[in-house]
Structures are given as structure tokens and as C-alpha cells.
Image: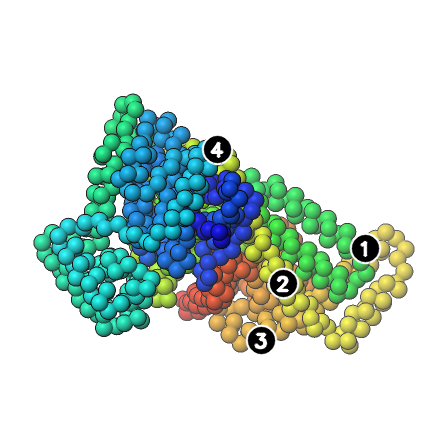
Amino acid sequence: MATITIALAGNPNAGKTTLFNTLTGSRQHVGNYPGVTVEKKEGGYTFPSGEHASIIDLPGTYSLTAYSVEEVVARDYLVQEKPDVVINITDASNLERNLYLSTQFLELGVPMVIALNMIDVAQDRGISLDAQKLAELLKVPVIPIIARSGKGTAELMGAALALAKENKPWDPLYISYGEDVDLALQTMAQRITATSFMTENYAPRWLALKYLEGDSQIREKGRAHNPAVDAELQEIVERVSAHLHKTMETYPEAIIADHRYGYIKSVLRQEVITHTFDIDRLHASDRIDKVLTNRFLGPLIMLGVLLGLYKFTFTFSELPVAWLETFFGWAGDNLSSLLPDGHLKSMLISGVIDGMGGVLGFVPLIMFMFFGIAILEDSGYLARVAFMMDRVFRIFGLHGSSVMAYIVSGGIAGGCAVPGVMAARTLRSPRERLATLLTVSFMNCGAKLPVLALLTATFFSNNQAQLMFLLTLLAWGVALTAAKILRLTVLRGDSTPFVMELPPYRFPTFQGLFIHTWERTWQYIKKAGTTILTISILIWAMMTFPGLPASEEENFARQRQEVESLSAQTPEEALQREEKLAAIDSDRAGSGLRHSLAGRLGTAMESVSWLPGFDWRTNIALVGGFAAKEVIVATLGTAYSLGETDPENTASLSETLAKDTHWNPLVAMALIVFVMFYAPCFVTVVCISRESGSWKWGLFSICFNTGFAFLLATLVYQGGRALGFAG
Ligand code: GDP
Ligand code: MG
């Protein structure tokens, strides 16, 4: 017999990954579903009888509507690939909610085995389940398992194999939705059958149901398939909707959901679930929720937890990040002494090593953040955070889950947009997720801080602390406003109804936490690594080539020779000579930068950058800042011929700026605003592209942010001048 295919499907947190790992061990392959960034995991399993199965881990969903990419992916996979068996993994300790998805599989008609997972947890809660009874009522095999220990999985696979061998045609379950809806479904199904309307893929009644649910994906397909029938069906939908609204003040979707739950309740009531000991009517989770989602206490606790997560991420990753920095510094120094001077050395050190340091430097940050998020997610608290924040974020066209991404990115100054972008994964709706991805980089990440610190200390030393605080608020305001603008324009569309269920609280397991953390971190290294290295080398080349013209190069060489030829008798004279040489080298680096591609770009940009008040030196620094924002300080130092400027020690640069006639508080303010909001650093851009599944969005973020920043900075500078401030 050929290999059979088995799809694992279920709610998020039902234990799919755990079961998948138990079954397939190390025989896994991770890819993507075509056209979307939803991860597709496949693995192999061999039955004791020697037969082989290929196992697919479908994305976790609560429903099979078209609200999220995950749901569409799961549904399309089932309909198009027609796996031999679906194993629907359910959380036995929370069966009623989990069966909501199961009924939708049954309505679709897929051959299915239900795995009642986490019966250990259910038992601890005093819930006992009659699997036999449930199997009889739902007419599908039901096998109790403990995915984590592997208990019951052999039996589960046996049942799956038996079902696959039966090879029966799909057999959709009919749930009654009340007279009005049933009648409409019947009429629609008849029309669908009579006109063979997409019937090669879907069952007629199921299609009718999707039309009633207002399923956007199915409707789109229907319109393309046969506009006339589509219009007819839509007319029936409108008629029932109007009728339902008039008679019951409700709409089809709500009726359908109500009846599905009704069906589940009626099944469970038939002695499927018994409580072996009397538990309080208030479930433990509900009691905890009384406090944690309390209207007043809830937000306070949440603030504490989020601050804690933030501290955790950035405190714990500090040491490993420092180690990595030391290591790459050491590697650079060693290489520097081994290799002869020249472009190769410069490329290896400034391009390759710095680029690799750039990629790996983020790893501890990402690991600790995902570890923290995994704790919140696996314990069930993240869903509560989303629930509480949803009302506020909804105003800006975002989702409650977005809050995490903003905070990690620098909602509290000093974060980083790279883990922030990755944190947006917890969002399920594509538009809200994109709006989050594209705006988190407006937050004040740790790399912008040295720039802001330099400028505020130089020009606003009296109110530095207050100003920094105001800038944090400004970042929030701008990020949320930008999100709103995006949601009203390029990402226009309805908000997703809050479909996230509040799962019961659960103690996370170390194994689960490590698997989740490692999976995500590895993805970052694998996906971002190669691209980042390439871009890092490109930026290095831009700031190096074509270099000084030969005549000037000779000029500097002659100057050096002149100084070197001076004899130095006393130590003071020797020191003076060294200083002179360093000054010549700085001058040469400054001229070289101006001659480089980046320098020419910076000079050419003066034709527009006078609007926000930037000169060519600032422009070059901003170009360099695309590599990483803290590079702005170092590049500014080079451009002012001050030699290498350490972002942590900017006293001489600060003095130079304070004295320079081009600079004044107004220019500084315009630059602060620009640095805060212009193009994200390229590591972030790479991550945005990866996470959104398209380079288009990475490019968009560069253009949108830079345009936006330019506008704001110009407003500050020209507005300030018009009002008579310095300038
Ligand atoms: P997924 O979202 O469906 O992939 O769920 P996971 O496999 O990540 O599991 C969610 C959490 O439930 C993890 O912390 C698992 O360790 C835990 N878990 C999974 N199966 C069992 C089980 O049978 N018993 C218990 N007690 N915990 C489990
Ligand atoms: Mg999983």
C-alpha cells in the first residue's frame, strides 16, 4: 500500500506539536505553504506493521472560517490535498470549546479520528470522559492520549490506519440550524447541485453554509466560478439575513455558532463528561480570571507582567550579548593583525565580521524574548493580555496581541525592533499583523538611544531627562497613528472579531518552552542570516568605494611622510608626532567617506535635505544608520574628521557640534525626529520581509518610514523657523 497521509489539526495549545514530535521524532521537514508564511511541518511515521505514513502538522485554529491565514491554509489543505485521515487533537480538559472545531471538520466530512489529549490534566481537574460514548455519538473513533508521554499514541495511530484502509468517501455531518437557516441551506444546496457550482471540491450544503457565514474566500471563488449562481446564492443569503434580523435581531453567523455549540452541548450532556469529584462551580481558571482580568487590577497586573518580561529579556540577554560582542571584537582584532592592510581586510572586518556579529548579536535577545513569550503563551496569560488590550488597540485598527510587539520594540525605551517584529507572530489576522510589523520600528530602540542622547545632551542639556521621556511618548503616539493611517489606506479592511478564546491557565512545561523557543530562534538564524551578511557587505562597499582619487591619496601620503620624517627627540615631540599622524588619518578617512558612494549620495541629497535642515555630513551618517542606528554617531564622527567615534564616548563630537555654525537646537530637534522615524535598520527590514512573506513590505517600510520622517522633520524645522526659533 502506498504511503498514507495523516493531517494533525486542532486548536492552538491542544498539543499538536507535542504529538507531532512524539510521532515523528527527528524525521521532520519544515517548509512553508505556497504563497504564505504559515509554516508547514511534515514528518514520517512507521507503523508496527511496516507501513509508512506521512504526517502533516496543520496550523492551529479555533475555527474553519476565513478570518485568518491559518484557517484558510488548514481548510485548503484538507479540501485540495484530501489527506487519508485527519487526527483532530483536542484538549480533553477543555472539551466543549475544542469540539467547536471538531464539528466543523465533521461538517466538512473528512475521515477523522479524535485524539482526546491531556487526559492527565482532565483527571487532575476531576473530569472523567467516556471516549466510547463520545465515539458513538459523533460516529468517529475517539482515543484518549497523553501526547507528552506518548501514552495511547500507538492505539491512536492504529485507529487512523484502520480508517485510512476503509477508504470511505467523505461523509458530511448535517447539523440543524433552525427552520429559517435550514430552509435557506436546502434551497441553496439544490441550486448548487443543479448547477454543479464548485461541487468537484466542496459538498453543496457546506458551500451553502459558507455563503451564509459570509466567508470571503469562498465567495471570491464562487464569483470567479460562476457569477450568475453566485449572485443567486447571495440573494438568498440577504433574504435570510434580513428575515433573521427582523424576527430575532440577529444574523446568520451568530445563529450558526449558537447551533454548533448547542449540538456540542447536547452530545456532551449524554454522560460523556462526568465530574468525579465535586469541583466548585467556579472553575479554578475562572477564579484566577476574576483577579487577573479585573477591570482595575487587571491592567495594573498586566503592566507589571509586561515590564517583567521586558526586564527579563533585556537583563538576561545582556551578558551573552556582551560575550558575543567581545568575541567578534577579538576576532576582528586578530584578523586585523594577521592580514595586510587593504580592501580585503577592511571587507572582512567591517563587512563580514560586523555583519555576522549583527546577526548573532540578536540571538540571545530573541531567545530570551521568545522564552518569556512562551511562558505567557503556554500558561494562557497572553490571551488575557490580548483580551484586555483589545479595546484600546482596536481604536487604532490593531489587535490586543499587538501590545507585546510594541513593548519589545522599545515601547519602554531601549528595546529592539527585531524581536519586536518576530513577536508580531502571535497575531492571527493578516492586516492587523502587517500594520503591527510596519509600525513597531517607530519605537525608540536601544540603538537610537546613543544618537538621541548625543543630541539632547549637546543641545538640550537642561531638560534632557524630560525630553527623553517625551520622546518615548512621541514614539507611541506616532506608531499608533501610523498604524491607524495604514489601516485606513493600504491595509484597509474590517477588524477581525476577537475570536481568540481564553484557554484555561496551565503550568507551562520546560520541554514545551524550550521547543517553542528553539524553533523560533533557529528560524531567525536560518532565514535572516544569509541575507543580512550580503547586505552588510554591500553597505561596507558603499561607504568604501570608489575611494579617494589618486592625487589626493598621494597628497595624504606625502603629508604623512613629512611628519614621519621629522625627528622626535623628546617624548613630548614623539607624542605630538603621533597626534599629527592621527589627525591626517582622520582627515583622510573623512575625505574618503565623502568620496564614497554613500558620501556622493549624501551630497546629492542636500538638494532636498535642506528642507529639514540637514547637510551632507548628516546625510552620510543617516545612510550609514541604515546598517544600524548607532552607526550614525560613528559616521558623523568620521565625517567631521574626528576619527573613529565610540557611540558610548561622544564628548569630542558633542563639542564639535556645539561649536559648528550649521548646528542649533532646531536642527538637532529635526534630526531627532528624523532618526526616530526614518527607515528601520536593514536587519529589521529583512525580518519584516521574512515575516510578511514579501520583499514588497520590507521596501514599503523603508519608503513609508523615510517619507513620514522627512515630512515630520521638515515640519519641525520649517515650522520652527517660521515661529522664529534659532535657524
Ligand atoms: P500546539 O499549540 O497544539 O502545538 O500545542 P503544544 O504541543 O505546544 O502543547 C501546548 C502545551 O501543552 C505544552 O506546554 C505541552 O507540553 C503541553 N502538553 C501537550 N500534551 C500534553 C499532555 O498530554 N499532558 C499535559 N499535561 N500537557 C501536555
Ligand atoms: Mg505548535
The number of discs equals: 4
Tags 3 and 1 touching, CB below 8 Å: no
Q: Is residue 446 above or below residue 14?
A: below
From mark 4 to mark 1, how far is it between C-alphas? 54 Å
| Residue hosting label 2 | 534
| Residue hosting label 3 | 604
From mark 2 to mark 3, how far is it between C-alphas? 25 Å
Foreground residue, 202 or 585?
A: 202
Q: Nearer the viewer, mark 2 or mark 1?
A: 2
Q: Amino acid at mark 1?
A: Leu
**Dot 2 alpha-carbon crowd within 10 angstroms: few under 14, some 14 to 19, many 20 or more:** few
Comes first in the chain, label 3 or label 4 = 4
Comes first in the chain, label 2 or label 4 = 4
**Dot 1 alpha-carbon crowd within 10 angstroms: few under 14, some 14 to 19, many 20 or more:** few
Foreground residue, 153 or 361?
A: 153
Q: Amino acid at mark 4?
A: Ser
Q: Amino acid at mark 2?
A: Thr
Comes first in the chain, label 4 or label 1 = 4
Q: Is residue 254 left or right of residue 436?
A: left
| Residue hosting label 4 | 149
From mark 2 to mark 4, how far is it between C-alphas? 44 Å
Where disc 1 sits, the SS reads: helix
